[in-house]
Amino acid sequence: MAGLCCGEPNTRGFRILKQYTHSFFSCSDDIAALGMRVMGNPLNSDEKVISGESGAVPLGLLYYLLTENEEMKKNLELDKDSSVLIINTEGNTDPDHYLDVVWKGKNPNL
């Protein structure tokens, strides 16, 4: 999605992340849209979160890995006992776009 197309990482941030991470992902628009949908439609007593693409992509990726990518889930050792921190960095900065994604199905997860 447009706001995520920066083209190059922040060099200072990248150096810090490189010391503490074991993997990284580049995600397509459908993963960000999936995260927006999951955050906006919680199960049970979870609170609803209205999020833009940048904020929703980590949860969209986690949900995708847990439900659709068994090999990567195994490689990352993700299971029912895993603890994952998700940081949402963006609220609803474009209400019309949010409705297009969450209500009208723009960028479906295939």
Image (cartoon, rainbow, N blue to C red):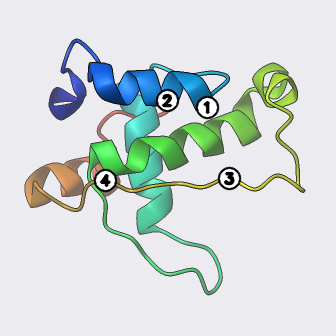
In the image: residue 86, left or right of residue 6: right
Mark 1 residue element:
helix
- For the point 39% across and 39% down, the residue is 32
Q: Residue furthest bottom?
A: 45
Q: What quarter of the picture does the N terminus occupy?
A: top left
What is the C-alpha distance between the residues marked 4 and 2? 16 Å
Question: Which circle, 3 or 2, is nearer the viewer?
Answer: 2
Residue type at mark 3: give it. Val
Q: Position of residue 30 (x, y in %)?
A: 41, 31
What is the C-alpha distance between the residues marked 1 and 4? 20 Å
Residue type at mark 2: give it. Leu
Q: Quick check: marks 2 and 1 in contact, CB under 8 Å?
A: yes
Quarter of the image for residue 105 reads top left
What is the C-alpha distance between the residues marked 3 and 1? 14 Å
Identify the residue position indicated by label 2 in the image. Answer: 17
Question: Which circle, 1 or 4, is nearer the viewer?
Answer: 1
Q: Quick check: marks 3 and 1 in contact, CB under 8 Å?
A: no
What is the C-alpha distance between the residues marked 3 and 2? 16 Å
Identify the residue position indicated by label 4 in the image. Answer: 89
Which label sits on residue 20?
A: 1
Above or below 56: residue 51: below
Quarter of the image for residue 63 reads top right
Identify the residue position indicated by label 3 in the image. Answer: 84
